[in-house]
Image (tube, rainbow, N blue to C red):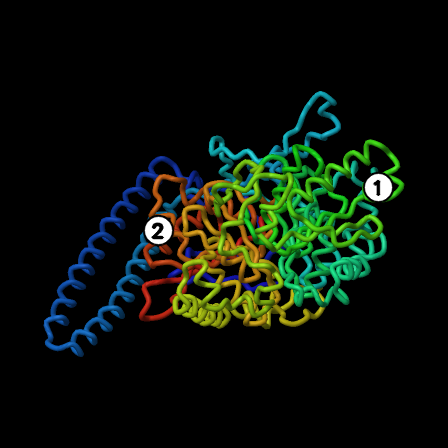
Amino acid sequence: MSRPLYRGVSGIGGKLAAADEAYYDPKEPSENGIGGGFGRGGARKRHLAAAAVKIGVLLLLAAALVGSVAWAGTLYAGRGAAARAAAAAAHRGYRRLQEQLVTDLLDIGELAGGGVRAKEAEVCPPEYDNYVPCYYNITDAVDVSDLGAGVVISYDRQCTRDGRVTCLVAPPRSYRVPVRWPSGKGFIWKDNVRISGQEFSSGSLFKRMMVEEDQISFPSDAHMADGVEDYAHQIAEMIGLRNEFNFNEAGVRTVLDIECGFGTFGAHLFERDLLTMCIANYEASGSQVQITLERGIPAMIGSFATKQLPYPYLSFDMVHCAKCNIEWYKNDGIFLVEVNRLLRPGGYFVWTSNLNTHRALRDKENQKKWTAIRDYAEGLCWEMLSQQDETIVWKKTNKRECYKSRKFGPELCGHDPESPYYQPLSPCISGTRSQRWIPIEHRTTWPSQARQNSTELDIHGVHSEVFADDNSSWDSMVRNYWSLLSPLIFSDHPKRPGDEDPQPPFNMLRNVLDMNAHFGGFNAALLKSGKSVWVMNVVPTNAPNYLPLIFDRGFIGVQHDWCDAFATYPRTYDMVHADGFLSLEKTHKHRCSTLDIFLEVDRILRPEGWVIIRDTAPLIEAARSVVTQLRWDARILDLDIASDEKLLVCQKPFLRK
């Protein structure tokens, strides 16, 4: 299994035990200095000793600071630019030693003070094992069938910051670390996802899964009637391609899969260099999103019911819906308008439904529904390319003039917001005024599109020199990550007991969540280095919105307010990365606490998962004091002797109940 980071003088003390040995009792007093068997007199002596140590530390700090100022003044008294440059370099080195001294003194003070530090967070009760904030949560003690027919459950996203859970969401008692990719694509541990007996008894899951004693496997032919490979080949032919290997040539790179089942279609397309994002409603159990993420396929909770999805317009090359439960004929076709918003010009909407069969259309009510859908599609300037069996493929127009020649259909939007962060569904057609209105067949194809030329960058207001510097910086940073953290996380990682020999590239990571993605440079550098990972690029709502650029590079991502919960289930990401995120939050004070944000990171991070935070030295030191409350194993690493930035590398422990 993964070798934990050992905490030296720059760590937080102690050593993370192996996953099979780790045990934490939230009521244990010795770790947080509460209780511990001391009498009243002993406690008084301990507090006096702690106060004395603190006074001593403050005196030493003051002396160090005074010495630093005097010493720096003598250096800068030299004459000439060369002398000043040498003095500056020497001062940086001295300051780093000084910062280390401060850290060591604080650690000594903490130890001498009897472990006086922030109290560790409690572990949530068992009913929070699958806790998803902002959504209705059914606890283990309540069965949906027991609530009665009169109870209406709302699965829409409803975020409030009142009553925020401040405990650690621990895994179920029988949770096991997921099987490493690519083997994990084919089977998962049954106890890692929440599936009730009701789903099994209904038989709906058996059609797509093979359930054994302790695992669930996913045959490749279980998702579609004729097998997923034949299904993908059929779609390619309907578009006019030879086979699914030609999707990239036709400009298809990113796919939005609505109610994706359990990710089989996306898993197949991934092998064809297509990146598929699965979205589905929140489900108390038998969740499509939870199971898809457990398999290592991109997914997040999302619904067409009332809100726009948190993606910019003109972002996906294909939207796919195979027997999803969206009633496209309702609300004047507003759900189709949302599909149109997300599709690039010339993009494809693939719809597979029982409603499309000749047998279903014998029913007059079904005929009425089908006619409404066809008319709505025509009003959006979609062209029906082909229909085979249950599957229909529409192509969105790539000509803006079409909207002027229509006889009916939704109006064009007067304003096109690029930041649809859970805004209400819009009944108008958006994106027609955007410079990003570029037909997919005219766009740079994958993988060249990840690099973006100067003309493409001008659309986003990004200078090519800035973009090139960002890419170069991230290429170097990823190499540093690998050299610093191997074999802890990435290449040449020792296998866990019982694991088969891993396949290249030997890394334990399958997915990464980048909390402050900027241009998506971290994503690009990971792919350039040959790592078999996918990245959820998150653009904070309080940061410059480069999410359209991220999608135009052929990546996927989402806008998010980190004071809200992320739209996913617990334990769904192998790594969380944050570059400059603490600095960003510092400029927006009084939003929410760093502890609140890190508690959410802990919820979505898998046991034994990793967190890498890159920021200024003072903010990294402050963050380290917060992660102690989460029981993360943490270590601060220096990046460059000439840099003011540091790296905080943390590993989430495997909390055993």
- Residue 203 is marked as 1
Q: Nearer the viewer, residue 408 or 495?
A: 408
In which quadrant of the rendered view does residue 151 lie? top right
Q: Position of residue 325 (x, y in %)?
A: 73, 39
In contact (CB < 8 Å): disc 2 and disc 1: no
- How packed mark 1 is, by other alpha carbons closer than 10 Å (few <14, some 14-19, many 20 or more), is few
Q: Residue at x 31, y 52 (%)?
A: 109
In which quadrant of the rendered view does residue 356 lie? top right
Local secondary structure at mark 1: loop
- How packed mark 2 is, by other alpha carbons closer than 10 Å (few <14, some 14-19, many 20 or more), is some
Which three-letter amino acid code belongs to the residue tagged 1?
Gly
* Residue occupied by mark 2: 110
Which three-letter amino acid code belongs to the residue tagged 2?
Glu
> Image height check: is 82 above or below 400?
below
Position of the N terminus by quadrant: bottom right
Residue 234 visible? The answer is yes
Q: Nearer the viewer, residue 56 or 558?
A: 558
- The residue furthest top is 150
Q: Is residue 288 left or right of residue 438?
A: right
Residue 177 visible? The answer is no
Q: Position of residue 622 (x, y in %)?
A: 36, 51
Q: Residue at x 82, y 51 (%)?
A: 210
Q: Is residue 408 left or right of residue 463?
A: right
Q: Nearer the viewer, residue 460 or 599?
A: 460
Local secondary structure at mark 2: helix
Position of the C terminus by quadrant: top right
Q: Residue at x 69, y 44 (%)?
A: 378
Label 2 vs label 1, nearer the camera = 1
Q: Position of residue 300 (x, y in %)?
A: 61, 47
> Image height check: is 98 above or below 191?
below
* Precedes in sequence: disc 2 or disc 1: 2
